[in-house]
C-alpha cells in the first residue's frame, strides 16, 4: 500500500500486518521498505479515522528500538533501519509466513458469548494465538472486550504473553477442563482430556510413592484426587522442588478426618519426610486459609496442634452437605407451618439444627471424638453453603427457586444467631491511630453517574422517553453489576424501544461494563441524531469523565451548555470542576445550582463530593454538611445511601464509635442482598474505624469477607490492601502482613480499576504506605506514576513534596513548590505555607519568615499563615510580632487547639515555661485527640523539666510516647517542633 504525504510517497504495510497491532513489525516494515521515515509518516491515517500508530505508542516503540540498536535517528525527524533491525524484521516476517490455520470454538461455546471461554478454547486447541486471531473472522471479539478478558485471564494466571503471542498456562488448562463441563459437549472428548491429565500425573506420583514408601491405597487415592486439582506450576517460582510440593499435598491427604485418631503433627511430618517446617506451614496456610489454588479446604480442629483437612466436593463434604440440606429444608418448612400458631409444638432454631446434624453424623460420617470439632465447624459451614447457593443458583426452575428461598430464610435466621461483626468491639476513648481518608474519593457513591441521571426527573420528562418501567428494571440490574442480565433484558425488550431508548440502554450497559470507547461511539451517534437535546452531550461527557479526560468532558458540556439552565448538565460541570481542583469556579456554579427546582438531593451529593475531594473535615468543622445529611435522613429515614454518607463524614472527623453504631444499626450487610455501592463504602468506613482503635485482627476478617462477597471488584482488593498497609505501619504481625503481599494486592486493585483518576489515588495510597515504612525510592517512583496518570490533581504533587521532605530532599521540594505556584496559581497560598515550613525545618528562619510575610499581605487573616508567622517570629526573637500574630489568631479562632499549642511553643521558645504549660493544657482541653497533641505533651515535658518538676515531666513524656506509636512515622519526624 502506498500513501502520499506532503513531501513524498510512503510505502506502508498491508492491512493484515497493520491490523495485528504489532508496532515493532509495522515500524521495521516501513523503514525496510522506504529510504527513511519521519514522525508524521508513522502517525498518518491509513484510512478514514484510523491512525497507523498513535503518538504516545510511537514514542515508546521508537525509543525501545533505538535502545536495542535496531534503528537510528541520524538527524532531526529522520529514522533509518540498522543491520540488526533488518535481521529482526526478517524474523518477524518469517513468523508471519509460518502462521498456520487455526482451530475455532464450536457454535455451542460461541452461542453463550462468554468471551473468556472462547479465548481459553482457542489457546488450548492451538499452540499460540495473536491478538488478531481473536478479532478477525470468525471469532470477531471487539478490541475493548478482548483487552478486558485477556487481562483478567493473565491476572488469574491462566494465560501468558510471549513476544506478542498468547499461550495457555498449566493453570489455564485446568480451568479449560472445568469450563468444558459447563457445555453439552461430547462426553467422551471430556473424559479423554481428563484421562490424559491423570495419566501424566500418575507417572510422576508413582515414583514419589515408591521413594517415600506410601503403601495405603486410601492415602494414594486421596493424594491423587488432591494433586489433580492443585497445579504445581502455580507455585513453581516459590517452591523449586516438585517433591516438596508433593509432600505438602501428602500432609493434607494423611491428616484427614477418615483416619482419626491417626495424626501427624507438622513437626513430626517435616522430620519424617525431610521438609522444612516453615515451608510446610507456609504452604498449608496458602492452600487452606488463602485458597491460593481456588479450591476450598475445610478444617476440623480437634486440638490446637491436631487439625484435620478435607476438600470441597469430596465424599465427606458431599455427604455432610446432604445431611445439612435435609435439616435446613425441614427447619424452613416446619417453621412456616407453625409460624401463625399461638402455641408452637416445636421450637425450631439454628442450635436445634446443629444438634440434629451432629446426631446424624456422629459415628457415621466422623468419629464420635470429633463431635466438638464438628459442632464448632457447622455454623461457618452452613453460612458458606448459604452464600454459595445464593451466588451460584440460577432461578430457572421451580426446584432452584425453592432451594434459594430455603437458604435465604436460613441466612436471615443466622443474622440473629451470630449478630453482626461490628458489635464485637468493646473500645474506649483513647487516642486513635492515624488513618488517611483520600481513598473515599474513589468510591462511586459520591458521584453523579449515568445511572443517577437516568433515574432523575430531567430524563423521564423527555418526550422521547416512553418506557419508564423498563428503565427502572434495567437500572436495578446495572446497580447490582448484573451486566449479562441487563443485556438479556435489553434484547428481550428491543422491539418495544424507540431508537433513543435503545441507544441510551446500549450506552449505559457499555459504560457499566468499562467499554468506554464503544460508549463514545454510541453517544456521538446520539448527539448527531438528537443534537438539540441535552442527553447525548451529558452521556458523552460522563464517559470522558470516567476515562479521566476532563478537558474533553468539559468541552462536550460547553458545546450544549452555553449558560442554559439544565440541572443535569450544570451538575455534571460542577463535578468535573471539583475533580480538576477548579474549586472556586465549581462553588460559584454550585451556589447558583442549589436554587434550581428538584436539585436538593444532587446539591447534597455535590457538597459531599467537595468535602471528600478537598478533605475539608481535616481543617474545618463539618457540622454544616452533617446537618444537610441529617435533614435528608429525617425525610428518608430508611435510606442506606444517606446513612453511609453520614458514616463517612463521621469517619473523617474521627468519631469512630458513632460510625460503627450507625453502620451496625442502619446498613443491611446480608450477603444475599449485594449492594456494592453501599456495602463497599460502608466497609471502608468500618475498616478505618477498627484500624483507628487498634483492632487489627478484626479488619483482616472484614477484608477477607469482602473479598468473598465481591471477588472481582477492585474495591474489594483495595480494602484488603488498606488493611495490610496499615498493619505494616502499626502492627507488622501475621503471615499476610508483608510488603510483597501488600504490593501484590494493591496492584490487583489497580489492574481491575477502570477509572484513570482512581488508579492514581490508589497509587497515592501505595506511596503513603511505602513512605511510612521507609521505602523512600519506591514511594517516590509510585507517586510519579500517580502524577503521570492524573496531572490535574495538585494533592498528588503535594504528596511528592511530603515524601521529599522526609527523605532529606528539601531543596528539590522547594523547587517543585515553585513549579506548582505556576501550574496551580489558585493553590499558591498552600504552597507558600509549605515553603515557609520547609525553611523552618532546615532552620533558615529568615527565609521562612520572608515568604510568610509576603503571603500575609495577600491573606492577612489566614489561620495557617498567621500561625507560621507567629512561630517563625519567635524563632528570630521578634517577640512583639510573634505575640501580635498569635493573639490575633486565638481571638479569631478560640476553639482551635492547635493555635494554643503554637502559643505555648512561642512562650516556651522565649523561656516563659509556666505560661507555656498553661497554653499547652488549654490546647489539650479544647482538642484532646487533635493531630498535634502528641507533640504538645512532649513540649510540656520539656517545660516541666526546665522548671525542675521531674515527676510531671515524666508523666507528660510517657503520654507523648504512648500517643506517638499511633501517629504516622513520617508525622512523628516531620512535626517535631514543626511550624
Image (cartoon, grey):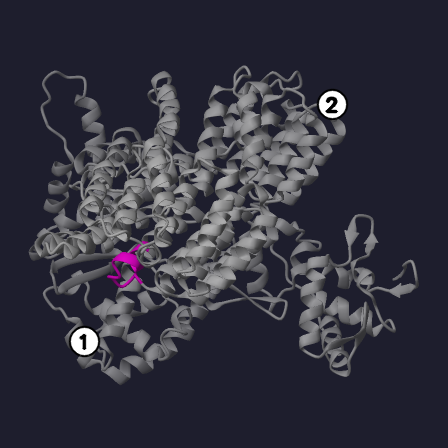
Residue farthest bottom in this picture: 211
Position of 475 compared to 50: left or right?
A: left
Image height of 244 relative to 566, above or below: below
- Any part of residue 683 in sight: yes
Question: At 33% from the left edge and 42% from the top edge, which residue is drawn?
Answer: 883
Residue 6 coordinates in the image, percent (x, y): 91, 58
Say which element carries label 1.
Answer: helix
Say which element carries label 2.
Answer: loop
Image height of 194 relative to 396, above or below: below
Which residue does the numbered mark 2 point to in the structure image? Answer: 532
Question: At 28% from the left edge and 46% from the top edge, which residue is drawn?
Answer: 384
Which residue does the numbered mark 1 point to in the structure image? Answer: 269
Residue 359 coordinates in the image, percent (x, y): 10, 45
Residue 492 magenta: no
Question: At 20% from the left edge and 69% from the top edge, which residue is drawn?
Answer: 254
Q: Give the range drawn in magenta.
A: 726-737
- Any part of residue 365 in sight: no
Residue 313 coordinates in the image, percent (x, y): 30, 54
Crowd rating for badge 1 (residues with CA inside 10 Å; few <14, some 14–19, many 20+): some
Question: At 64% from the left edge and 62% from the top edge, which residue is drawn?
Answer: 103
Residue 733 magenta: yes
Image height of 299 relative to 649, above or below: below
Crowd rating for badge 2 (residues with CA inside 10 Å; few <14, some 14–19, many 20+): few
Task: Name the quadrant of the N terminus.
Answer: bottom right
Amino acid at each position: 500500500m502506498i500513501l502520499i504525504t506532503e513531501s513524498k510517497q510512503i510505502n506502508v504495510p498491508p492491512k493484515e500486518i497493520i491490523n495485528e497491532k504489532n508496532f515493532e513489525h509495522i515500524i521495521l516494515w516501513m523503514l525496510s521498505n522506504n529510504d527513511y521515515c519521519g514522525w508524521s509518516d508513522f502517525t498518518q491515517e491509513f484510512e478514514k479515522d484510523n491512525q497507523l500508530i498513535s503518538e504516545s505508542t510511537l514514542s515508546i516503540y521508537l525509543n525501545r528500538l533505538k535502545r536495542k540498536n535496531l534503528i537510528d535517528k541520524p538527524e532531526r525527524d529522520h529514522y533509518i533501519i540498522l543491520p540488526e533491525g533488518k535481521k529482526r524484521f526478517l524474523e518477524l516476517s518469517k513468523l508471519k509466513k509460518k502462521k498456520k490455520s487455526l482451530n475455532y470454538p464450536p457454535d455451542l461455546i460461541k452461542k453463550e458469548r462468554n468471551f473468556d471461554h472462547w479465548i481459553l478454547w482457542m489457546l488450548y486447541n492451538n499452540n499460540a494465538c495473536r491478538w488478531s486471531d481473536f478479532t478477525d473472522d470468525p471469532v470477531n471479539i471487539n478490541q475493548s472486550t478482548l483487552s478486558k478478558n485477556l487481562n483478567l485471564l493473565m491476572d488469574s494466571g491462566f494465560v501468558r504473553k510471549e513476544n506478542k503471542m498468547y499461550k495457555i498456562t498449566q493453570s489455564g488448562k485446568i480451568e479449560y477442563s472445568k469450563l468444558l463441563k459447563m457445555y453439552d459437549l461430547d462426553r467422551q472428548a471430556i473424559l479423554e482430556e481428563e484421562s490424559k491429565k491423570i495419566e501424566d500425573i500418575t507417572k510422576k506420583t508413582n515414583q514419589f510413592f515408591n521413594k517415600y514408601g506410601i503403601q495405603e491405597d486410601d492415602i494414594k487415592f486421596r493424594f491423587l484426587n488432591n494433586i489433580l486439582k492443585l497445579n504445581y506450576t502455580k507455585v513453581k517460582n516459590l517452591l523449586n522442588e516438585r517433591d516438596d510440593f508433593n509432600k505438602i499435598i501428602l500432609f493434607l491427604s494423611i491428616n484427614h478426618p477418615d483416619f482419626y485418631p491417626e495424626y501427624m503433627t507438622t513437626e513430626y511430618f517435616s522430620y519424617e519426610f525431610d521438609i522444612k517446617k516453615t515451608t510446610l506451614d507456609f504452604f498449608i496456610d496458602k492452600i487452606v486459609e488463602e485458597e491460593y489454588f481456588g479450591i476450598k479446604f475445610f478444617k476440623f480442629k480437634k486440638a490446637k496442634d491436631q487439625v484435620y483437612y478435607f476438600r470441597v466436593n469430596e465424599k465427606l463434604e458431599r455427604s455432610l452437605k446432604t445431611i445439612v440440606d435435609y435439616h435446613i429444608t425441614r427447619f424452613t418448612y416446619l417453621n412456616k407451618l407453625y409460624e401463625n400458631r399461638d402455641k408452637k409444638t416445636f421450637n425450631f432454631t439454628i442450635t436445634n439444627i446443629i444438634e440434629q446434624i451432629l446426631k446424624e453424623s456422629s459415628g457415621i460420617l466422623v468419629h464420635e471424638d470429633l463431635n466438638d470439632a464438628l459442632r464448632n465447624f457447622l455454623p461457618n459451614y452452613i453460612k458458606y453453603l448459604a452464600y454459595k447457593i445464593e451466588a451460584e443458583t440460577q432461578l430457572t426452575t421451580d426446584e432452584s427457586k425453592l432451594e434459594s428461598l430455603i437458604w435465604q430464610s436460613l441466612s436471615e435466621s443466622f443474622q440473629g444467631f451470630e449478630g453482626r461483626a461490628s458489635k464485637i468491639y468493646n473500645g474506649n476513648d483513647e487516642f486513635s491511630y492515624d488513618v488517611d481518608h483520600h481513598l473515599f474519593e474513589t468510591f462511586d457513591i459520591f458521584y453523579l453517574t449515568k445511572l443517577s441521571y437516568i433515574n432523575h426527573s430531567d430524563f423521564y420528562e423527555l418526550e422521547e422517553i416512553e418506557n419508564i418501567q423498563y428503565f427502572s428494571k434495567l437500572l436495578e440490574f446495572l446497580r447490582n453489576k448484573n451486566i449479562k442480565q441487563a443485556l438479556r433484558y435489553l434484547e428481550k425488550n428491543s422491539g418495544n424501544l424507540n431508537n433513543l431508548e435503545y441507544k441510551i440502554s446500549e450506552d449505559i450497559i457499555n459504560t457499566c461494563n468499562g467499554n468506554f470507547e464503544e460508549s463514545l461511539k454510541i453517544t456521538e451517534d446520539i448527539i448527531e441524531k438528537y443534537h438539540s437535546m441535552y442527553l447525548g452531550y451529558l452521556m458523552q461527557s460522563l464517559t470522558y469523565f470516567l476515562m479521566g479526560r476532563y478537558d474533553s468532558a468539559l468541552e462536550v458540556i460547553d458545546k450544549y451548555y452555553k449558560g442554559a439552565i439544565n440541572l443535569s448538565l450544570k451538575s455534571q460541570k460542577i463535578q468535573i470542576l471539583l475533580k480538576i481542583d477548579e474549586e472556586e469556579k465549581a462553588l460559584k456554579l454550585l451556589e447558583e445550582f442549589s436554587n434550581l427546582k428538584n436539585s436538593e438531593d444532587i446539591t447534597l451529593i455535590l457538597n459531599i463530593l467537595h468535602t471528600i475531594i478537598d478533605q475539608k473535615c481535616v481543617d474545618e468543622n463539618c457540622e454544616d454538611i452533617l446537618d444537610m445529611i441529617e435533614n435528608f435522613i429525617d425525610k428518608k429515614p430508611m435510606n442506606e445511601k444517606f446513612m453511609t454518607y453520614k458514616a463517612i463524614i463521621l469517619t473523617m472527623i474521627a468519631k469512630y464509635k458513632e460510625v460503627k453504631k450507625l453502620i451496625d444499626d442502619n446498613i443491611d450487610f446480608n450477603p444475599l442482598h449485594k449492594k456494592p455501592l453501599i456495602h463497599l463504602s460502608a466497609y471502608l468506613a468500618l475498616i478505618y474505624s477498627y484500624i483507628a482503635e487498634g483492632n487489627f485482627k478484626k479488619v483482616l476478617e472484614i477484608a477477607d469477607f469482602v473479598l468473598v462477597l465481591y471477588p472481582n471488584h477492585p474495591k474489594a482488593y483495595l480494602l484488603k490492601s488498606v488493611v495490610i498497609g496499615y498493619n505494616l505501619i502499626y502492627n507488622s504481625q501475621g503471615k499476610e502482613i508483608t510488603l510483597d503481599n501488600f504490593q501484590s494486592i494493591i496492584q490487583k486493585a489497580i489492574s481491575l480499576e477502570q477509572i484513570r483518576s482512581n488508579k492514581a489515588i490508589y497509587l497515592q495510597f501505595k506511596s503513603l504506605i511505602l513512605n511510612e515504612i521507609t521505602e523512600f525510592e519506591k514511594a517516590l517512583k509510585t507517586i510519579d506514576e500517580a502524577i503521570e496518570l492524573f496531572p490535574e490533581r495538585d494533592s498528588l504533587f503535594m504528596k511528592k513534596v511530603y515524601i521529599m521532605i522526609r527523605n532529606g530532599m528539601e531543596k528539590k521540594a522547594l523547587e517543585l513548590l515553585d513549579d506548582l505556584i505556576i501550574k496551580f496559581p489558585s493553590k499558591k497560598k498552600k504552597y507558600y505555607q509549605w515553603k515557609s515550613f520547609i525553611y523552618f525545618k532546615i532552620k533558615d528562619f529568615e527565609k521562612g519568615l520572608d515568604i510568610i510575610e509576603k503571603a500575609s499581605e495577600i491573606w492577612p487573616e489566614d489561620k495557617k499563615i498567621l500561625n507560621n508567622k507567629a512561630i517563625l517570629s519567635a524563632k528570630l526573637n521578634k517577640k512583639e510580632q510573634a505575640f501580635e500574630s498569635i493573639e490575633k489568631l486565638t481571638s479569631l479562632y478560640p476553639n482551635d487547639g492547635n493555635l494554643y499549642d503554637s502559643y505555648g511553643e512561642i512562650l516556651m521558645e522565649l523561656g516563659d515555661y509556666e505560661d507555656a504549660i498553661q497554653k499547652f493544657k488549654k490546647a489539650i482541653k479544647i482538642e484532646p485527640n487533635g493531630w498535634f497533641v502528641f507533640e504538645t505533651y512532649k513540649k510540656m515535658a520539656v517545660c516541666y523539666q526546665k522548671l525542675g518538676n521531674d515527676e510531671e515531666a515524666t508523666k507528660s513524656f510517657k503520654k507523648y510516647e504512648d500517643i506517638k506509636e499511633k501517629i504516622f512515622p513520617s508525622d512523628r519526624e516531620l512535626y517535631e517542633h514543626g511550624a
